Structures are given as structure tokens and as C-alpha cells.
Amino acid sequence: MSSDQSSNKKKNNFTIIKDDSTDGHGGYGYGSISLENMSSVIVDPNENKAYVDMAAMHARSDIERRVKYLNDKNEVPNGKLYWIVWVNVDQGENGPYYSGVAGSELRVDRSIKRAYKSMPEHVTHMEKSLKGKVIVDHMDEHSKKLLKDFLVEFDPDMWKNSKDELKDSLPE
């Protein structure tokens, strides 16, 4: 791991389980969806890297800024491929683990300041990740390898504690 990656790792931590904001009282906010156990990982197959960028939770990551979004991928034919991977962390009997992982496509063409992003797909994938689903089959093999390497290196114990479904979906 380069020193740049090492410093990024320390600055961009996954959000790991916090106290229940409602303290069990069932009042205001009870039943609302909490994103505090979710992190957004950017996978950039062009630069061979993956990193946490929490600004992607609000569509404000560096790669998403200063572009106009289009709903048709064909209107961004030269778009550079990125994946925003919604990673949810949960607490298991052996400690924290990656419980839900879902990758959403993003294509950005800086030369025309346009990008393709399917908002319904991103929202659906965030929801599926929150529910502990693994959705990465549509990702290219290189991107899946970058994601796996990142998750393993970020926290080997969380990877070890994760379900076989995730491990089988992100092969060597």
C-alpha cells in the first residue's frame, strides 16, 4: 500500500455501529432509516484504486461535482467508468462485518461536463445494501478485484467475518 493510500485509509474510516439515536423510546425518528452504518466506496478501474468518499452519500464526491447528469448512458459515450459501492457494516457474533455491498455505475466525461447516473439504481442499491444484500455481479472483474482488495486491506477482520456470499461474489 502506498503512503498516499495509507493516509487515505486513516482519514476515511467506515462508519461502524453507533448507539441507537432513539434510545428505544419509539418517539420522533422511530422507524426512520439510519445510514450511519453505511459508507460509500468509489472504485476507479481507470486509476486502479478504491477509496472511501462519504460525500458520495449526498452525490457530492469529487467525481460527481461540476457535471450535468443525464439519464441516457448513450449521451455520455466517452464517459470514464466509476462505481459507487454502498457498503453497510453490521455487528455479528464475531464482531463487525461487511453485511451489504451494492455497486452502482457512474460514467463521467469531464471534457463535456456530462455524466450518466441512474438515480433509481443508486437509491435501490443503497436500500439493498442496508438490507444486507450483495449486488456486484454487473460489475466488471477488474473493478470487483479492486473492491475486494480494498475491503480486505481496509479491515481483514471485517472481511473474515463477512458472509460467504460476499466472498464468493468478489473472487481473486
Image (tube, rainbow, N blue to C red):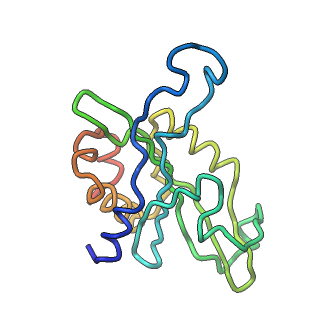
Give percent across and percent down for residue 56: 58, 58
Camera-nearest residue between 71 and 65? 65
Give percent across and percent down for residue 105: 58, 60
Is 149 on the left-hand or right-hand side of 125? left
Q: Residue at x 38, y 35 (%)?
A: 90
Q: Residue at x 22, y 44 (%)?
A: 160
Is 162 on the left-hand or right-hand side of 12? left
Q: Residue at x 56, y 71 (%)?
A: 81
Q: Is residue 154 above or below residue 3?
A: above
Is 26 on the left-hand or right-hand side of 85? right
Camera-nearest residue between 119 and 35? 35
Which quadrant of the figure has residue 80?
bottom right
Q: Residue at x 76, y 64 (%)?
A: 72
Q: Quick one: quadrant of the C terminus?
A: bottom left
Camera-nearest residue between 155 and 134? 155
Which residue appears farthest toward the top when viewing the image? 25
Give percent across and percent down for residue 132: 44, 35
Which quadrant of the figure has residue 51?
bottom left
Give percent across and percent down for residue 170: 34, 54
Which quadrant of the figure has residue 112?
bottom right
Q: Is residue 5 above or below residue 166?
A: below
Q: How many numbered circles does the render carry?
A: 0
Q: Quick one: quadrant of the N terminus?
A: bottom left
